[in-house]
Image (spheres, grey):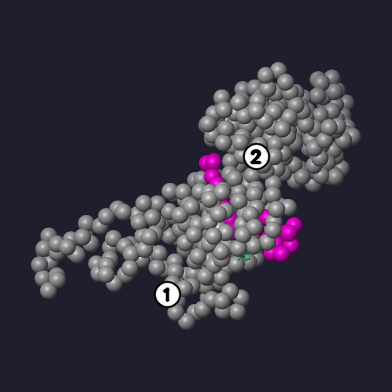
Amino acid sequence: MTDTVHALVEAADRGHGDVAATVEEIGLRNVAATLVNEIIFRAHLEDLAAAESARVCSLVITLTHRGQEVSAIVSVGHEGVEIGKTARTTDIPPTRIVQDVCETVLALYGPCERITSASREIRWPSPHTMVSRLVNGPAVPRLFHAVVQRVVQILERDRPVHLTDLAVRHGTDKWSFLHQYTQHYQRHFAPLRDRRVKICEIGVGGYGDAEAGGGSLSMWKEFFPRGLVYGVDIADKRVLDRPRITTIQADQSDPEALRSMAEKFGPFDIVIDDGSHMSPHVISSFKTLFPYLTENGIYAIEDLHGSYWPELFGGSEDDLNSPDFTVGFLKQLVDGLNHEELLEREKRAAQSTDKLIKGIHFYHNLAFIDKGRNEEGSPLAFALREAPEILGLKDYNE
Ligand SMILES: C[S@@+](CC[C@H](N)C(=O)[O-])C[C@H]1O[C@@H](n2cnc3c(N)ncnc32)[C@H](O)[C@@H]1O
């Protein structure tokens, strides 16, 4: 399913013709299974079920392609959400949503401007059933309409999403009693939401327990509907792999391991370091992965407290400007940001990132580094350095 979803995301970026060719190549059945899986992941029908615990309602999703069709029945009720071949016992027949498969691929994975619903048909149960219930009762359960509405909302990609909600839902501590990072991620990542991003996070979570963790990877998968998410962890986390989520076992302190991971899966639009939080690891990971960040990519580093705390993370407060510790290292990048303003350039060794970092943002315990061209020039610094007389400062160098 992972290969299928990657192929569909790429094809959706290129347009309808490529999507149709990909569907032909992969087969309608496989594509439909991937799409239904994605719809159910995004729809959170279990919330609706919880609100109406005594009911079970079913919905049929039918995807069509050149005269063929494939259907999946989704049942929602007190036992949760089930995708199967037959509907669970319900007191009302299922509604059917029918849509062309290529249009559905574009709606889920294409750029926003490609979302259409020209082929969509909602086939409600027969008028006989529905009108008779309207007149004679029992009333149509709210769940019946809510399930259809939620799936349509996913197909139109107009379900509002906030990272704080997603953090709590998917169980990452990015918003919790420990941290309130999601407000900052929301601000920095919102403009990228509908792009076909590749995001790599160091630190899957759950430490040595192979099945635990992955909360933030699921959060990113939902936040970036067209995103491909890669999680790096020192522990083997492959059981957490899902469509659009791939985990890689690697020690972030090993530059070669990170490099070969990035050669295979990068370049990335976003890298997040939420791994060991040990300064030497954080700094060497940044040095290794920054070149694998796309031109306007964003590199985030969490839990800066690792820079200060000796016991837990080998940090130090002795010299807060030391480049051997994460925060001191980042402060040096701030000087690099202003490299064109320095008058006595010989006092500071130029760094390879000076011209490649266009923004640095600090929040409590969290930093973002924006990659981008940093060569605006500084006419005033030039004049102060090279030709003070044009500023009327004839004696400047004396
Ligand atoms: C705080 S958890 C990550 C939480 C997750 N990002 C989230 O927000 O839900 C830290 C993870 O980093 C992993 N880790 C620790 N040291 C590492 C290293 N040297 N290289 C890669 N991963 C490491 C741990 O196994 C653990 O699963």
Residue at 57% x, 32% y: name it: 11
Ligand 1 image position (quadrant): bottom right
Residue with the mark numbered 2: 3
- Residue span colored magenta: 194-215
**Residue 269, percent from left and from top:** 50, 49
Image coordinates of residue 255 in percent, x first then y, are: 53, 62
Q: Nearer the viewer, residue 145 or 132?
A: 145
Disc nearest the viewer among 1 and 2: 2
Q: Which mark is residue 321?
A: 1
Question: Where is residue 25 drawn, in percent x and y?
Answer: 65, 28
Residue 225 lies in the magenta-colored region: no
Q: Residues within 10 Å of mark 2 (few under 14, many from 20)?
A: few
Q: Are marks 1 and 2 in contact (CB under 8 Å)?
A: no
Secondary structure at numbered mark 1: loop
- Give, as a three-letter code, the residue at label 2: Asp
Q: Write the residue at 65% across / 53% down.
A: 247
The residue closer to the viewer here, 301 or 121, is: 301
Label 1 environment density (alpha carbons within 10 Å; few <14, some 14–19, many ≥20) = some
Q: Is the C terminus in the top left, top right, bottom left or bottom right quadrant?
A: bottom left
Q: Amino acid at mark 1?
A: Asn
Question: Is residue 42 something one can see in this rendering?
Answer: no
Magenta stretch, main secondary structure, is loop
Residue 390 appears in the rendering: yes
Compared across the picture, whether 156 is left or right of 376 comes to right
Does label 1 or label 2 sit earlier along the sequence? 2
Q: Nearer the viewer, residue 318 or 266?
A: 266
Distance from Cα at disc 1 to Cα at disc 2: 46 Å
